[in-house]
Amino acid sequence: MQRIRVWDLPTRLFHWALVLIVFLAWFTGDVLESSMEQHQWLGIAIVGLIGFRLTWGLVGSRYALFSQFVAKPAQVKAYLKGDWKGVGHNPLGGWSVVVMLLLLTAMVLTGLFANNDADFTAPLAFMVTSDVSSFLTRVHYLVFKLLFVVIGLHILAVFAYKWILGKDLIQPMIDGHKLAESETDESATGGGWLALILALSVAALAMWGASAAWYTPPAKPAVQTTPDW
Ligand code: HEM
């Protein structure tokens, strides 16, 4: 069977950047609780990555498209019966990607309105009352726990594929290539420069929105100071 290109470079860079940034966000937010400034910027970077991936899922190359890997229940059933062949995300894996992206979105959206009950308020917290901000902070922690479990299962599944089924999924996520499984499997096409510019623009716009760079806080009323006598 022929070696074909499955994961384009933007998808691979997205994946490994996400792994690094999610790790650093966990480290700064959970381990070093005093690094909220860095944690906030890592969260904004994740917003950019999600904006990029959601757009790339619509305009990217073949196997990165949602239409390719968001499977119907019958396809998931067939996969579970061992009746599926393909080189992209398998039907169950495709759904795990959707779940991870949804949880990551929920995590950054709630994080942007959060506060730490001390010296930190997230960039968009000014838009909500402090009660809502505290509620969203609790949801942020909860979603993080869920995401932690799902990421754990994801990594476990990848290693189960390697060690139990003898199928290496990691190398293709590094070099982009797999062996074709059937005659109809072909190298990915699509996802050209225009698509990349569009996805990067959405990412930049999402980061700008999340950082509240568009917001100018109202000027504080001038305080009448007592002359220095
Ligand atoms: C913070 C940790 C991680 C997150 C959030 C994460 C998330 C994701 C996402 C969203 C995808 C879908 C890629 C796409 O289509 O854009 C994916 C795929 C993949 N990830 Fe991860 N990942 C993590 C850690 C890892 C690690 C540590 C490994 C390897 C040891 C790994 C190996 C893979 C592989 C091989 C795929 C492709 C699976 C397939 O062939 O269907 N991931 N991951």
Image (cartoon, rainbow, N blue to C red):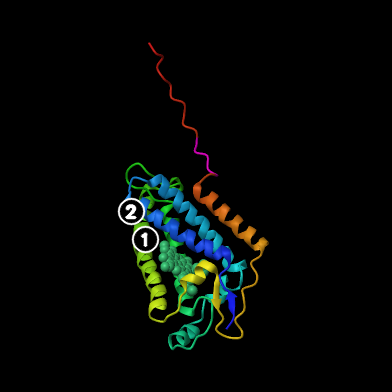
Task: Please give the label number shown on residue 204.
Answer: none
Q: Position of residue 3 (x, y in %)?
A: 58, 77
Q: CA distance from mark 2 to mark 1?
A: 10 Å
* In magenta stretch: residue 81: no
Task: Please give the label number shown on residue 144.
Answer: 1
Depth order, front residue of 59/161:
161
Depth order, front residue of 221/152:
152
Specify the amino acid type for callout 1: Phe
Tell me what residue is drawn at x 58 percent, y 67 percent: 8
Q: Position of residue 195 (x, y in %)?
A: 64, 63
Q: Position of residue 13 (x, y in %)?
A: 53, 61
Q: Which residues are magenta?
A: 214-218
Spot the residue most to the top.
229
Q: Name the secondary structure under disc 1.
A: helix
Quick one: label 2, few (<14), some, or many (20+) residues within 10 Å?
some
Tell me what residue is drawn at x 38 percent, y 68 percent: 150
- Where is 127 relative to 56, above or below? above
Specify the amino acid type for callout 2: Asp
Rendering quarter of residue 187: bottom right
For label 2, the residue is 30
